Image (spheres, grey):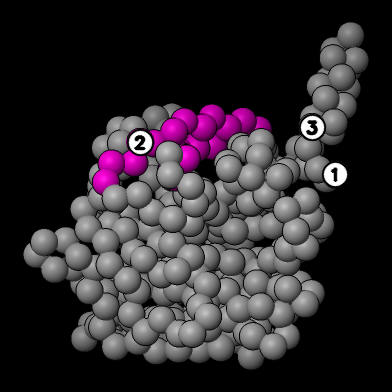
Amino acid sequence: MVWLTAATALLTMLGTAPAGAADEWQKVGGDARSGVSGLAYEGRTGDGAGVHVLVVHDNKRSGRQRLSRITHWEGSDGISPITWNGPEPVDLEAIEAIPGMPGEYLAITGRGIVYRLKVTGSTATVVDYSPLPAIGEGDDFESFALVAQNGKLAALWADRGAGADRPATLYAAPLSFAPWGQPQFGAVTRRAYRAAYPTDDGTRHISDISVTGSGRIVVSSAADAGDDGPFDSAVSDAGRVSVSAAGRVRVTLAASPTVLGSFPRYKIEGVECLPGSAEALLGTDDENLGGYVRTMPFCAA
């Protein structure tokens, strides 16, 4: 009887998730409005067995959900809405916790508007917002990461690129904050990046960025054939970043990125290395098919 119950549960999961999702990916959204466009670590659960993360949704119409909280355990997830208090963004694509500032985050839109947020309970309040620096013609952003080294902060973000003719452009700059809260960026450097996988015509070479404690740059790449797929994606070791005591940011990209894992049928748009762990939390925005999360050991030093 126990075996029959387990088998029935497994068949139920297989009937509601894409092929290969059972016992791996966990569903957190059921439609195009609730996919995972970006992830930010918020903290551990009280028992230490799970994590709380903030999730941005790339909704464009007024009144739709922009931000949620996922509580992720192995084999189970809970999701709850976060109320957005302040000017409403269009097309949020990434979010990152600000190191050393508990409860504060930076979130960016596809067109490069940066929102500084203060999250308290189930409300996110906009502290300030401004454009990213050095936005290039046609840039479309899906990624953002912050690095804290030697008492200094730096930001990494990327135009996602599009297929063979447009590699991603990875931007990096020192970061500080004005007394009134506005993010302020220093001198910007740029590096071109091509994904080793996938290699479809519409490949987004960088769909998200995370940085390990030692400075490894971990990126996701994704291919999207339309709102119903098929999708394809991978997570790769892209290179390294360092920030000197003087605040100088140095990015070294790998000539041949190492693919850490490939994920046919999924469109990964969120990668978050979990502090104190080798685990990365991955999130997908599979458009009409919803969103999924899972962990993978991609963030070892």
Q: Earlier in the sequence, mark 3 or mark 2?
A: 3
Q: Quadrant of residue 98?
A: bottom left
Residue 16 bears which disc, if any?
3
Spatial separation of the CA atoms under disc 3 and disc 2: 29 Å
Disc 2 marks a residue whose amino acid type is Thr
* Residue 85 inside the magenta-drawn segment: yes
Closer to the eye: label 2 or 1: 2
Q: Is residue 189 visible?
A: yes
Q: Is residue 231 visible?
A: no
- Please state which of residues 74 and 272 is positioned toward the viewer in this rendering: 272
Q: On the image, numbered disc 2 is attached to which residue?
A: 83
Indicate the position of residue 104 as horizontal and vertical percent values.
Answer: 27, 51
Is 32 situated above or below 145? above
Q: Are marks 3 and 1 in contact (CB under 8 Å)?
A: no
Spatial separation of the CA atoms under disc 2 and disc 1: 33 Å
Q: Which residues are magenta?
A: 64-86
Q: Main secondary structure of the magenta part?
A: strand
Label count reads: 3
- Please state which of residues 209 and 91 is positioned toward the viewer in this rendering: 91
Circle 2 packing at 10 Å, graded few (<14), some (14-19), many (20+), is some
Query: Residue at image x 58%, y 81%?
Result: 168
Q: Which element type, helix, strand or loop, lies under badge 3? A: helix
Disc 3 marks a residue whose amino acid type is Thr
Query: Residue at image x 42%, y 49%?
Result: 41
Q: On the image, numbered disc 1 is attached to which residue?
A: 19
Indicate the position of residue 50 as horizontal and vertical percent values.
Answer: 50, 36
Closer to the eye: label 3 or 2: 2
Disc 1 marks a residue whose amino acid type is Ala
Q: Is residue 81 left or right of residue 130?
A: right
Circle 1 packing at 10 Å, graded few (<14), some (14-19), many (20+), is few
Q: Earlier in the sequence, mark 2 or mark 1?
A: 1
Is 192 situated above or below 148? below
